Amino acid sequence: MPKTKTKAFYIPSVDDLLRAGAQFGHSTQRWHPAFKPFIYKRRANIYIINVEKTIAYLKKAAEALYKMLDADPDLDIVIVGTKKQAQEYVKELGEKYGLFYVDRKWPAGLLTNFEKVQESIERLLQLKERYIRQKYQLTKKELLDIKRKIERLERKFGGLTFMRKLPDLIIIIDTKREEVALSEARKLGIPTIAIVDSNSDPRLVDYPIPMNDDARRALGVVLETFKKIFEEKRGDKLLKLREKFNEHLKELEKKIDQEFGILREAAEGKKEETKETVEVVRVKAYTPLEELGLSSNVVERLKLAGISSVEELLRRSPEEIKAIRGIGRKTAEKIISLLKEYESRH
């Protein structure tokens, strides 16, 4: 049977879905009564899903997605799929087409407590910068601690970086497994497109796609429809943000490496060739922020802003110091006053 073309995207045929195993639902003991309209028949204690209805509902979902992207190509979309069969597809769609994605455990409160989660997302970006800025200043143990924090946050929020507001659409693979994500989206009125198996309630989804959500090949067949839409209609705003940040990290690392190289050359020029002497010269080039008499909380805020020594702080103008996130006006004025005292002593 030929594929059915709708606008600029394709809907898979009945044969495509049958060959991929999209028709196999869960056992008759594990089904949701609301799924009954999508069941073709019962066979060997397994419900067989009517794939003609899969196609009809996939078409509705695809048309809705096409229309949304036609109105705004840079729509904020989150795609969620944490089961093994879905993880690869979710990450691929997220990375290739500029979607936010969750391919591991859904961070509870991602939508309903977004401001708190956003702090963790921002902290991930800040720690990546800090790791580079301080890689020649901190001990191996301190660097390892930062690296572990980055890895932990990356696992939870890596696919959500640069997410500044609640999404406009959520795409979910397996509403039973991702019931927390679906519940949060419904609570906030965020539209949903979801692949729904026979053990779930399709009424909870704005655009349900009834089919087997455990068959990897079937997921690939259906998600191909979305890929075609993204290829034509998706904007590149998020992709550019990711690319720009990665380039920033590369340039920053290059700059830090060059600065450290200059310090080493200066040390070698004085014929201080032993590792211990070079370390002393390097450490002396940076004065810890604590020597200004700042509290540990203020020091942490400054380090998150990429300022790890008094010398770096001295290179900032009063306006730049006042603009540092998490530093209040009074604290900024105190820092400026302490810097003046420090300069007068040195």
Image (cartoon, grey):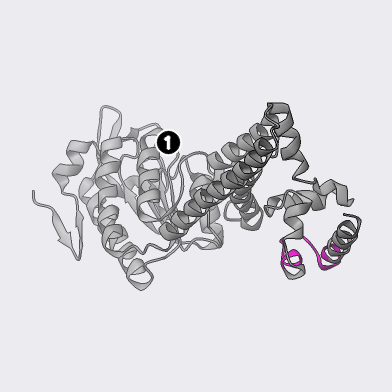
Residue at left offset 35%, top offset 34%:
26
Q: Is any atom of residue 238 visible in this view? A: yes
**Furthest residue to the bottom?**
71
Is 331 a magenta residue? yes
Q: Quadrant of the C terminus?
A: bottom right
Horizontal relation, residue 286 to residue 268: left or right = right
Where residue 24 sits, quadrant-wise, is top left
Is 62 a magenta residue? no
Horizontal relation, residue 41 to residue 213: left or right = left
Q: Nearer the viewer, residue 33 or 83?
A: 83
Residue to which mark 1 is pinned: 83
Dot 1: element: loop
Give the x, y percent position of residue 210: 31, 47
Residue at left offset 80%, top offset 46%:
287
Residue at left offset 40%, top offset 44%:
91
Q: Nearer the viewer, residue 146 or 22?
A: 146
**Amino acid type, callout 1:** Lys
Horizontal relation, residue 346 to residue 231: left or right = right
Q: Is any atom of residue 182 visible in this view? A: no
Give the x, y percent position of residue 239: 41, 57
Decide: few, some or many residues near mark 1? Use Cα within 10 Å; few <14, some 14-19, many ≥20.
some
Q: Nearer the viewer, residue 99 or 140?
A: 140
Horizontal relation, residue 168 to residue 275: left or right = left
Give the x, y percent position of residue 312: 72, 54
Where residue 268 sits, quadrant-wise, is top right
Give the x, y percent position of residue 77: 43, 58
* Number of numbered tags placed on the structure image: 1
The span picked out in magenta is 320-332
